[in-house]
Structures are given as structure tokens and as C-alpha cells.
Image: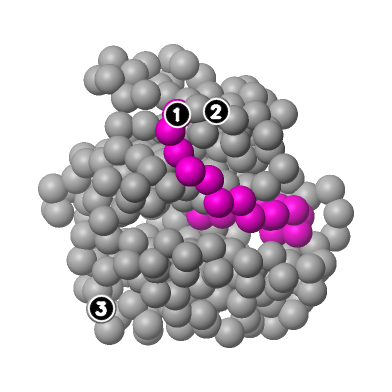
């Protein structure tokens, strides 16, 4: 999630520890090696520390051995202004990850269940200022988007739908918002033509080079502070030139299972 509203609401987050079977996690986009559960846990510890450094109260759920991808909680719940949409996730092996997250969030938010036949991963929803940017991808179908749009509209939020290219997994993988009025996206995936309606409204687009596509996924906080993936020097330079202070997390071992920074949190109030 990005945008002003979500940053103001980033007082709490749910994360989930890395599964003991993380080596069996789905890996088809970024993964160049078998995911390493022990190394990924070290990364996750630093990730949680970075959130807490930004004043976030973090609820850490235990990992689930039966769900190798369970640490990617973003996909299992989408918060919409006092409510949470619990989706049917786009990969059948992940169905069931939502159960505990639903229980925790039901204590704070109205729970809305996505109907059967509709699929959506939370990674295909970017909250941007006063609207949702939604990705139609291999994990998110038209019925899932239609249901989510209905929920968002009932709470006063518009939405825009983008076709997610086959070169990437989710919309958030290559598109995020470090502050209001600004998007970070990667060359070679989204096109200027797709983003032209936003550019015409005055939205500032920061493009990162294709070879650093992974680093287009960032987490912004108030005060122009942003969490970024380590070892992407051009993206770090672009963000710092735009006035941000950066906190880097080495995401190499999370990336091995196609995960990014935003994948590992669900923010809520």
C-alpha cells in the first residue's frame, strides 16, 4: 500500500515469521536460487527492526510449516479504511494463509470476504493518495477486481486498473508510492502511456532502471523516510536526490521466493 492515507495509518502492522519450509516457496520471477529459510529469517528480523524504527507497532505471527509462502502477508488481506477484504489468493497452494490474519484483523476492522470465483492477491493493490491502483495479473482476475472496486467505491475511493505484464508478478512488485503525489516504478514493465493519466494530473513518476526493477518496491513513511532494498545504488541515488532519507534492508533471501518489501506487511490502524 502507498499514498497519504495509508502512511497516516501506518501505526500498526502484521507480519509473519518465515516458514520452516521456505525453501519450498513459489519462485518463478526473481528467484535464482533455492530460498534459504535460515538466511530469510535473518532478513525478516532486520525488516521488523526497520518497521519499529519508524514507529510501527508490529504484531509478529508465527510461521506456518504447511504454507511456505506465509511470510508474504500482504497478499492475504487488503485494508480499506476501517475494513479488510479477505481475498481468495491466486495460487491454490496459498489458500488457507488468510485464516489467522483474518482472526487478528477482525478485532480491529470490519471483515469482508471475497466471493468464490473471485481471486486477488493483495500485491495487486496499491493505495495511492485518494484511490487504489489495481493490477490485473496471473494472480488477480476480473471478478476479484470488480468486487474490490465495489468495496473501495462504497468507502469513497476511486480506482484505476492496469494490466500487469508477464515480466513481473504483482503491481506492487514494480510500482509503489514513497509519498503523496509520487510513484516509483521500473522501466521495462509499466509504460509511460499506462501512467499518462496520472502524469497529466501532476503525479511525479520516479523511474528506476530495468536492471534495478526489484528496487521499485519501497515503503514510505511520514517525514520523507523510505525503506528500500539494499544493493540497488541507482534507486537509492534517485530517492535520495528526491529528498528522502533511506533505510536499507538486504532482501536477497526474500527475493529468492519472489518476495519484496511490501509483501511482508499488512498495515492497519
Q: Is residue 237 magenta?
A: no
Nearest-to-viewer mark from 1 and 3: 1
In-front residue for pair 120/56 = 56
In the visual, does 159 lie left or right of 57?
A: left
Q: Please tell me how crowded label 1 is: few (under 14), some (14-19), or many (20+) other residues with Cα within 10 Å.
A: few
| Number of the label disc, if any, that sits on residue 238 | 2
In the visual, does 211 lie left or right of 1?
A: right
Q: Which residue is mark 3?
A: 108
* SS at circle 3: loop
Q: Residue at horizontal 47%, vertical 47%? A: 226
Nearest-to-viewer mark from 3 and 2: 2
Image location (x, y in percent) of residue 145: 36, 47
Measured along the vertical axis of the image, is residue 20 above or below residue 230? Answer: below
Note whether residue 87 is visible.
Answer: no
* SS at circle 2: helix
Query: Which image quadrant is residue 236 in?
Result: top right
Query: Which image quadrant is residue 66 in?
Result: bottom right
Q: Is residue 251 magenta?
A: yes
Q: Which residue is mark 1?
A: 242
Image location (x, y in percent) of residue 256: 76, 55
Amino acid at each position: 500500500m502507498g499514498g497519504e492515507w495509508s502512511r497516516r495509518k501506518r501505526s500498526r502492522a502484521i507480519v509473519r515469521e518465515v516458514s520452516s519450509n521456505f525453501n519450498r516457496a513459489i519462485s518463478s520471477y526473481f528467484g535464482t536460487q533455492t530460498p534459504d529459510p535460515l538466511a530469510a529469517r535473518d532478513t525478516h528480523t532486520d525488516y521488523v527492526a526497520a518497521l519499529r524504527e519508524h514507529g510501527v507497532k508490529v504484531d509478529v505471527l508465527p510461521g506456518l510449516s504447511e504454507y511456505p509462502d506465509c511470510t508474504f502477508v500482504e497478499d492475504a488481506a487488503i485494508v480499506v479504511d476501517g475494513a479488510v477484504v479477505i481475498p481468495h489468493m491466486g495460487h491454490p497452494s496459498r489458500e488457507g494463509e488468510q485464516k489467522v490474519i483474518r482472526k487478528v484483523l477482525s478485532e480491529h476492522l470490519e471483515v469482508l470476504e471475497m466471493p468464490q470465483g473471485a481471486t486477488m492477491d493483495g500485491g495487486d493493490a496499491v493505495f495511492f493518495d485518494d484511490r487504489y491502483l489495481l493490477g490485473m495479473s496471473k494472480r488477480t482476475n476480473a471478478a476479484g477486481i470488480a468486487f474490490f472496486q465495489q468495496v473501495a467505491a462504497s468507502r469513497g475511493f476511486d480506482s484505476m486498473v492496469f494490466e500487469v505484464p508477464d515480466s513481473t508478478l504483482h503491481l506492487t512488485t514494480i510500482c509503489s508510492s514513497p509519498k503523496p503525489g509520487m510513484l516509483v516504478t521500473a522501466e521495462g514493465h509499466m509504460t509511460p502511456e499506462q501512467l499518462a493519466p496520472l502524469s497529466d494530473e501532476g503525479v511525479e513518476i520516479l523511474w528506476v532502471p530495468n536492471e534495478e526493477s526489484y528496487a521499485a518496491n519501497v515503503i514510505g513513511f511520514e517525514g520523507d523516510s523510505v525503506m528500500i532494498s539494499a544493493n540497488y545504488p541507482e534507486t537509492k541515488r534517485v530517492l535520495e536526490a528526491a529528498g528522502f532519507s533511506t533505510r536499507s534492508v538486504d532482501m536477497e533471501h526474500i527475493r529468492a521466493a519472489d518476495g519484496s518489501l511490501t509483501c511482508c506487511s499488512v498495515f492497519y490502524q
